[in-house]
Image (cartoon, grey):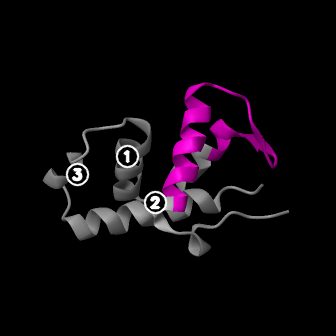
């Protein structure tokens, strides 16, 4: 079994995989991943994140907020650091 880990992927690769998975989820396609479905994986992934990571993940990948929504809350470097951390934590939950 191959485990996807954000540790060995580029920022763009992580972002692309997550956007693809979100599109599957939004179309409500049933996709089995290891022992559960995608919804369970998303729930578990969100539980592994701290509050800032959850906030960024939701705005960037689920709510599709305005491109610069984060400027009121984070500096540019903090935003990208938190976003990367959230993506890595989410991808660590996947085993395909």
The image shows residue 80 at horizontal and vertical percentages of: 33, 65
Q: Is residue 91 rendered magenta in the image?
A: no
Which one is nearer the viewer's eye here, 7 or 49?
Answer: 7
Splitting the image into 4 quarters, where does residue 23 fall? top right
User: Which residue matches tag 2?
Assistant: 86
Circle nearer the N terminus (3, 2): 3
**Residue 86 x %, y %:** 46, 60
Residue underneath mark 3: 70
Q: Is residue 28 above or below residue 73?
A: above
Q: Nearer the viewer, residue 11 or 86?
A: 11
Q: Residue at x 65, y 46 (%)?
A: 41
How much space separates mark 2 and mark 1, taking CA atoms?
Answer: 11 Å
Contact between marks 2 and 1 (CB within 8 A): the answer is no
Q: Secondary structure at mark 2?
A: helix
Q: Magenta span covers which residues? A: 13-41
In this figure, which residue is indicated by the disc labeled 1? 60
Left or right: 61 as drawn, with respect to 95: left
In the figure, residue 73 lies in which quadrant? bottom left
At 35% from the left and 43% from the top, the residue drawn is 59
What secondary structure predominates along the stretch shown in magenta? helix
The answer to whether mark 3 and mark 1 are in CB contact below 8 A is no
Q: Nearer the viewer, mark 2 or mark 1?
A: 1
Quarter occupied by the N terminus: bottom right
Q: Secondary structure at mark 3?
A: helix
């Amino acid at each position: 079994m191959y485990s996807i880990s954000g540790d060995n992927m580029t920022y763009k690769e992580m972002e692309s995989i997550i956007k693809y998975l979100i599109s599957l989820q939004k179309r409500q396609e049933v996709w089995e991943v290891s022992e559960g479905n995608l919804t369970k994986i998303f729930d578990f992934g969100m539980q592994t994140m701290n509050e800032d990571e959850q906030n960024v993940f939701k705005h960037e990948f689920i709510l599709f907020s305005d491109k610069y929504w984060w400027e009121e809350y984070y500096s540019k470097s903090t935003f990208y650091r938190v976003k990367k951390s959230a993506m890595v934590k989410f991808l660590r939950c996947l085993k395909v």
